[in-house]
Amino acid sequence: MSRAASRHTWSNRWAFILVTMGSAVGLGNIWRFPYLAGDSGGSVFVLMYLVCVAVIGLPLLMAEILIGRRGRGNPVAAMLNTAEEAGRSPWWAALGWTGVVGALLILSYYSVVAGWIADYLFQAVTGARAETAAVAAEGFTALTSDPLRMMFWHTVFMILSVGVVARGVVSGIEAANKIMMPSLFLILFLLMLYGAWVGDMPSAVHFLFDFKVEAITPRVVIEGVGQAFFSLSLGMGAIMAYGSYLDRNTGIGGTCLWVAGANTLVGLLSGLAIFSLTYGYGLSPSEGPGLILKTLPLVFSHMPGGRVFGALFFLFVLFAAWTSSISLVEPFVSWLTERLGIHRVKAALVTGVPVWLLGLAVCLSFNHWSDVTIFGRDLFKALEDLTTKLMMPLSGLAIAIYVGWMMGRAVVSDEIRLTHRRFALWFGVLRYVVPIGIVMVFFHVLGLLK
Ligand code: PHE
């Protein structure tokens, strides 16, 4: 415990809110959210997402921070410490491991996608143009069929992410977020104005917010839950690791409201900006994972000020991806430093190298190895489905059961410190609604996986 007692903490409450927002706001909000919304009929998906964030995401976010802070250690140690305190089996540490390993698996493909963004930023800055839709689409295909180019940017991005974590919790992670997150909000604001100015904002608003009950299908519900998990960084050790550096006096509830609120807002606002540009140019919103990469370069090539705003846009996405990937590196690094006593710099390297290698294979899964399949999916899709459709919901379920039923009401209420009524509401939702919700969705996923 002596090491735990001397653990450093974030500089203040806002620093914690900022880093947690940094983890949450990422490719999930800007790349994944719009393309899923585009593919799943817009507003219904948005509505499901909002409901899932409020009912499942927010309570779980609080629960995960609570475990980290109570356990005062990396995700594995936090689970061990809290399980010991509650007189539960040390096997609960498996939940910590699921998070640590899941984070590394996500990082392997996350970094490849972030590499695409870095490539597009480079193109935007150097003035590359896409005059026609065909050229824009070809541009994306040219990138994904060139493994060396993808590997290059993936490598750059891994160095950026691992480098920040190597510098430390406060002087690395917190410092990076303090620069990138405010810049990100500022750029998003400018992009919104730009979207409203040159794009077709009314169509974007209709697409994202017109309520159509009849379009709710099991698939949309599943995608909504999955997206709530992904965009709030749930179940993957990242939030637990960050929570472990939170001081005892900061209220968890209010902090989480800020994080979940800002995260949702960034998703919606970037959706508005992206779709108003897409519609403004008469393009279709259902383009799949290549959405922002296929449509936006074309739009930016033709709209006034497109070159500057194009570069700003990709910088915005890169910052978002970077602050998230840092939080994917941290769980294992903290385990290595605390458990094996390795220096942080070395721990960051030990973490980065295997993930980087797996990422190289992911780069190949788009081209040379595209016919190598795992359960009918190429490596990229297999890793994405494994982490977002299986690992995230299952560990979310386990966290809800653990905090709701295993840790003991007294410990939980001592740590979360909510008023009596709020506690009753949160605890009730965590014990019943979250597990039942996840189990129901999970059965559907299993049906889909067949
Ligand atoms: N929340 C991040 C995003 O939206 C992704 C992420 C998932 C980060 C899990 C950490 C842990 O892009």
Image (cartoon, rainbow, N blue to C red):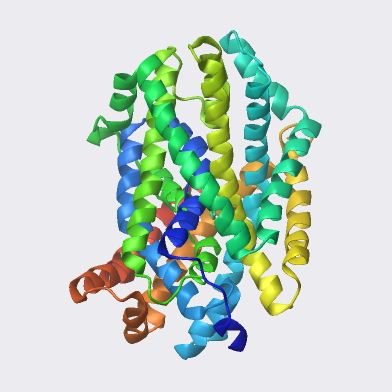
Q: Nearer the viewer, residue 152 or 102?
A: 152
Q: Position of residue 263 (x, y in %)?
A: 40, 47
Direction from residue 274 to residue 329 in the image, left or right: right
Vertical placement of residue 325 versus 119, above or below: below
Q: Residue at x 50, y 63 (%)?
A: 239
Direction from residue 303 to residue 297 in the image, left or right: right
Q: Residue at x 68, y 30 (%)?
A: 119
Q: Position of residue 90 (x, y in %)?
A: 56, 85
**Quadrant showing the N terminus:** bottom right
Q: Position of residue 126 (x, y in %)?
A: 68, 20
* Displayed quadrant of residue 129: top right
Q: Position of residue 225 (x, y in %)?
A: 40, 50
Q: Nearer the viewer, residue 335 or 38?
A: 335
- Total tally of numbered discs in the picture: 0
Vertical placement of residue 114 versus 259, above or below: above
Q: Residue at x 37, y 45 (%)?
A: 264
* Displayed quadrant of residue 121: top right
Residue 423: in sight, yes or no? yes
Residue 377: in sight, yes or no? no
Q: Nearer the viewer, residue 432 or 354?
A: 354
Vertical placement of residue 156 versus 24, above or below: above
Q: Residue at x 28, y 68 (%)?
A: 426
**What residue occupies the far left of the structure in this picture?**
421
